């Protein structure tokens, strides 16, 4: 998962799965599957203990089957993916390769090299490229973005382009957005939540990565993001896309436009956020400079809270302007709410009132990828 | 509807509505609504007759409310839309206007002028542009594509960019694609049909218009099309978009990619299609040069047929190569099937066999916008 999703999106996906009874553990080795009379796996014995199971899914990964190619003298990369040119020719121009056994170019050289991204969609495209080339039509395949989408119970997990971790490792100066909210207007029947992360190249303002997870309509936003990245769109262009709006399909401003607005605000220095990973790391390292401000209503606080109550001040947004005196100006103030819309507004109020160091919590409670606290 | 949808997509939408019991008639004037005891409309009296009704929907159009602006001396266009610059300033720079009362610029000057396109999404964007400009942030609004989506019963009707009629009137040399099919792989539960039309600039190969109608997942394809048009994508770029593929979300090649492939094939002279409007016009004008070839199976023919049986030859696709002698080489041959996939293959077989004038029926039976024939 590390290559496909950044930690916060991966953890949010795991939280969804855990809520469905899926047992996800790390750092253990499976020793045995133990069945029962009907031939189904009843227990999984690991290096730690024994887990009762109704269903076992083995996700052992994918690797290219390229032994035949190697025996034929074709070039493969260190992971075994057959190397091809834009017409799907191998180093022997009379031998074409396509599908799950090849290494793909990454669109616009985003990844700085080839990527192994086996997808049925890409295989189909390779087939057309190869048939065209054989027939004398030299249409080059531009490469892929490493787009992946999958359905796990009723949630969707999706990604395209670079993760933040990949982008930073490749030397990109990146800004990120973690957006949480609903796929439809709040009043429309069937509205469902999801979380979305944008990875933006600070220098060019181009979107270079997208990840999302949730029960909401993720696939539409994935495809818009993949189209935008393919066309090297800036967040400024994305912020103004004339997407289809009617209540059965989207809020008036589609979430991907709102996320682009957040990216604009961050890049233009209009607001400042802090990621949940960074916040947790600093609190756990004992950083005493951080004070959280929960700007939700008391009723919301009764339902669920962040950990770190010992450093959280509760001031509902509507009361913030008259209670500024309760907050220490020398600390880093981190306002938050359910999705960080009010958290953002609180940041604007506090910064406007002269607090020098305020960052809203990216994505708020809804995008918090770790355990939440339910008050007794 | 003429300004929003081309005739075939408009008629397909009307067929869907008629199938739900909606009475759509043209060329009549409503004279009176007649109620019953519960205060609901029971009958609609028109210039032709009286229609029993359960529900009446008045779709009387939208026009800008700009009297106040006119009184204030602000410039409006002939339809009453307030004229604004990219910062939503009127001709009085201290007065901003946004929302449903203004005339918008059309993105990339596609329409050659301003368009009245009142949408909640655009109004929201105007609000941000205006607030930014007042606050000293001069972010220009690039304009709209005239994107519209609406839900009618369980079908979706959507459009963005230029219709074929608009594009031709503006002098564009256009190619069109009429695609029909399903939104998911055929084996996946819940797969639903829809039809889609692409309007392509032949000179630049850019997508300039999109329309779709059906029960399937239209909104996702609309948003991809709107993003692609905004970014001036060619059909060659669209054909290779790395969109999210997994069976719950899309066939391996998303319909919009398949439609782009059809556009490529047409522009590159690899295949030739004829639109249902053109086919019907020519047949009704008594053109005796057209012979239709229904390449579906006998079982499919028992369910539904095109009109024009008197000039239709039935040869299932699998038998076509051995029955070429039954078709007249001097005529225009129009093969078709349910969605024109087999129709296209038949065109390739016939053209390959030396038939000089073969055009598959765009979109096949599924996109036929007129009455179909059900065999007795």
Image (spheres, coloured by chain):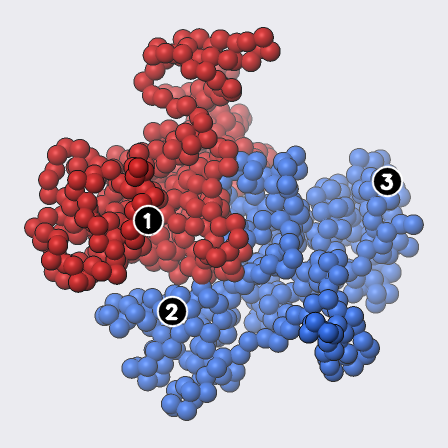
Chain colours: A blue, B red
Q: Is residue B356 above or below residue A124?
A: above
| Residue B74 visible, this orientation | no
Is disc 3 placed on a helix, strand or loop? helix
Q: Residues within 10 Å of mark 1 (few under 14, many from 20)?
A: few
Is disc 1 placed on a helix, strand or loop? helix
Left or right: residue B284 compared with residue B113: left
Chain ID at mark 1 = B
Chain ID at mark 2 = A
Q: Which residue is mark 1?
A: B300
Left or right: residue B187 compared with residue A365: left
Q: Which residue is mark 2?
A: A126
Q: CA distance from mark 2 to mark 3?
A: 57 Å
Residue B23 lies, in percent from the top left, at 41, 23
Residue lying farthest to the left in this orientation:
B330
Left or right: residue B152 compared with residue B343: right
Look at the numbered discs 2 and 3 and tell me whether their residues touch, using CB distance below 8 Å: no
Q: Residues within 10 Å of mark 2 (few under 14, many from 20)?
A: many
Of callouts 2 and 3, which one flags the residue occurring earlier in the amino acid sequence?
2
Q: Which mark is residue A298?
A: 3
């Amino acid at each position: 998962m590390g290559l496909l999703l950044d930690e916060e999106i991966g953890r949010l996906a795991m939280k969804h799965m855990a809520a469905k009874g899926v047992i996800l553990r790390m750092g253990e080795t499976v020793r045995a599957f133990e069945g029962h009379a009907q031939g189904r796996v009843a227990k999984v014995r690991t290096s730690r203990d024994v887990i009762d199971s109704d269903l076992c899914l083995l996700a052992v990964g994918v690797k290219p089957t390229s032994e035949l190619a190697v025996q034929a003298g074709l070039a493969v990369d260190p992971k075994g993916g057959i190397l091809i040119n834009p017409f799907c020719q191998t180093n022997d121009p009379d031998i074409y390769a396509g599908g799950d056994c090849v290494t793909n170019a990454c669109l616009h050289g985003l990844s700085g090299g080839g990527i192994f991204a086996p997808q049925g969609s890409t295989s189909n495209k390779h087939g057309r490229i190869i048939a065209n080339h054989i027939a004398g039509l030299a249409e080059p395949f531009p490469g892929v973005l490493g787009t992946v989408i999958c359905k796990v119970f009723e949630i969707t997990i999706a990604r395209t382009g670079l993760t933040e971790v990949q982008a930073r490792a490749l030397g990109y100066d990146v800004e990120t957005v973690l957006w949480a909210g609903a796929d439809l207007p709040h009043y429309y029947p069937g509205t469902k939540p999801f979380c979305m992360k944008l990875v933006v190249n600070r220098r060019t303002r181009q979107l270079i990565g997208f990840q999302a997870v949730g029960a909401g309509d993720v696939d539409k936003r994935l495809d818009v993001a993949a189209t935008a990245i393919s066309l090297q769109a800036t967040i400024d262009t994305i912020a103004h896309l004339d997407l289809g709006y009617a209540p059965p399909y989207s809020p008036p401003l589609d979430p991907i436009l709102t996320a682009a607005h957040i990216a604009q605000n961050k890049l233009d220095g209009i607001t400042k956020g802090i990621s949940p990973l960074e916040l947790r790391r600093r609190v756990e390292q004992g950083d005493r400079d951080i004070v959280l401000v929960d700007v939700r209503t008391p009723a919301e606080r009764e339902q669920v809270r962040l950990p770190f109550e010992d450093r959280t001040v509760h001031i509902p947004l509507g009361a913030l302007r008259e209670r500024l005196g309760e907050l220490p100006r020398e600390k880093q103030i981190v306002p938050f709410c359910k999705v960080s819309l009010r958290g953002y507004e609180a940041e604007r109020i506090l910064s406007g009132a002269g607090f020098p160091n305020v960052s809203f919590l990216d994505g708020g409670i809804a995008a918090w990828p770790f355990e939440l606290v339910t008050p007794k």
